[in-house]
Every structure is written in C-alpha cells, then in structure tokens.
Image: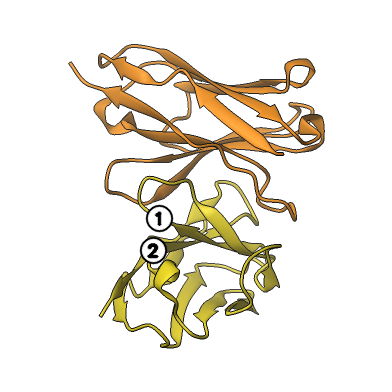
Chain colours: A orange, B yellow
Amino acid sequence: EVQLVESGGGLVKPGGSLRLSCAASGFTFSSYSMNWVRQAPGKGLEWVSSISSSSSYIYYADSVKGRFTISRDNAKNSLYLQMNSLRAEDTAVYYCAGEPAAMVDYWGQGTLVTVSS
Amino acid sequence: DIQMTQSPSSLSASVGDRVTITCRASQGIRNDLGWYQQKPGKAPKRLIYAASSLQSGVPSRFSGSGSGTEFTLTISSLQPEDFATYYCLQHNSYPHTFGGGTKVEIK
C-alpha cells in the first residue's frame, strides 16, 4: 500500500523555522519527482516546491523562494521541507505529493503549520 | 508564469445533474493538466490526468477533455458523494499552478 506520511508541523512564531518530513512507502520513491503543496485555511491549493528524483532539479514558488529549501534522501525514502523566516501567510496545511505527470497519484494526509505570535 | 482561470467558482446542482467545470490556461500547456477532487479535511484526490485520462478507480461518470488552453471536467450524473471542491493543476512548466477551485454544492 502506498503511503506518504508528513510530520513536523506545529506552532511557530513569525521569523522562526520548521522542518517538515514526509516518509514514503509502498512505491519506488527514488524513481519519482516529489512536491510540496499547501492550503491556507479556507483557501485553495498552492504548489510550493518540486524536486526531481535525483535532486538535480529543484523549483520553488516565488512566495517561498529564498526562505524554503526542499530536499530528499532516497536511501531513507524521505522528503523534506526546511522552512525559515516564516510569516503569518505561511500558515497552511502542507501536503507531500507525488509527480503530477505520473499515472499514479500520491498524497499525504497533510501537516498543519501555524505561524503566530 | 502560467495562470489557470477556473470557472465557475461555485455551483449548485442536484443529484443526477450534468456538471461542467472549465479551466483556461494563460498559454498553451499541451495536455499537461490534472483534475482533483477535495473533500473537507481531506487530501486532494486526482480524478483525471493528462487532461482526459481517467485515474484508476475513479467512476466513469467523470471525464476530462481539452488541450492547449481550454480544459473541461464533466460529471455526467452528479452523485451525493460528488459534492466537493474541484481543482485543475497545470504541470507543463514551473511554477506549477492550480486553478482557483470550484465548490459543488447541493441545490
């Protein structure tokens, strides 16, 4: 069974940092690019970042560029998102997701990040 | 950046109705588009990939069409479990972009 399990969310003060993790199982993680997608409370979906299967290609939304860093460890079947200089507008549920171009569709259950003083 | 304009933003429909949702891309994206369904408190679930291919396990009442800049998601006969919010996603180029969403409500 395919599983993506996010962790690391929580309450953080503005300007603080948080590291999200996504543990993958049930598929060949190292073969797929991976993504982070977020959803602010009551709002739509926003793509945040992508990383290719071998980490050669990395992309960010303008809203997080320079503050967030995506990475992966294929040996551990894990995806990460290091979030620095957090702002109130970064408050959202963060989803780990698979490659949208792939025939298979993988999503985690999401982890809530709340940025508030 | 490619903008995805999704319409309508919401609609009211009855069980059995035919429902159509449209996404327009600001520039051509070939068929690099997926349609997603999201229910409250749940992760999105893809219904359609490559603009018109039905995701495995998704009922055949869902269909997608289009290429280039105009795309459509059709639900041929709305069922009670279909009341949800629907999003398109273009993955032709970075940044990937979602449409604004369409909330399908019960009339």
Q: Which amino acid is tagged 2?
A: Ala
Q: Which amino acid is tagged 1?
A: Lys
| Picture disc at residue A40 | none
Q: Residue at x 25, y 27 (%)?
A: A88
**Earlier residue among tags 1 and 2:** 1
Q: Position of residue A86 (x, y in %)?
A: 34, 20
Using a 10 Å C-alpha cutoff, classify the residue at mark 1 as few (fewer than 14 neighbours), some (14 to 19) or many (20 or more): some
Q: Is residue B74 left or right of residue A25?
A: left
Secondary structure state at the residue bearing disc 2: loop
| Picture disc at residue B39 | 1
Q: Is residue A31 above or below residue A55?
A: below
Q: Position of residue A33 (x, y in %)?
A: 72, 37
Mark 1 touches mark 2? (CB < 8 Å): yes
Q: Position of residue A80 (x, y in %)?
A: 58, 21
Q: Is residue B96 above or below residue B72?
A: above
User: Disc 2 sits on a residue from what chain?
Assistant: B
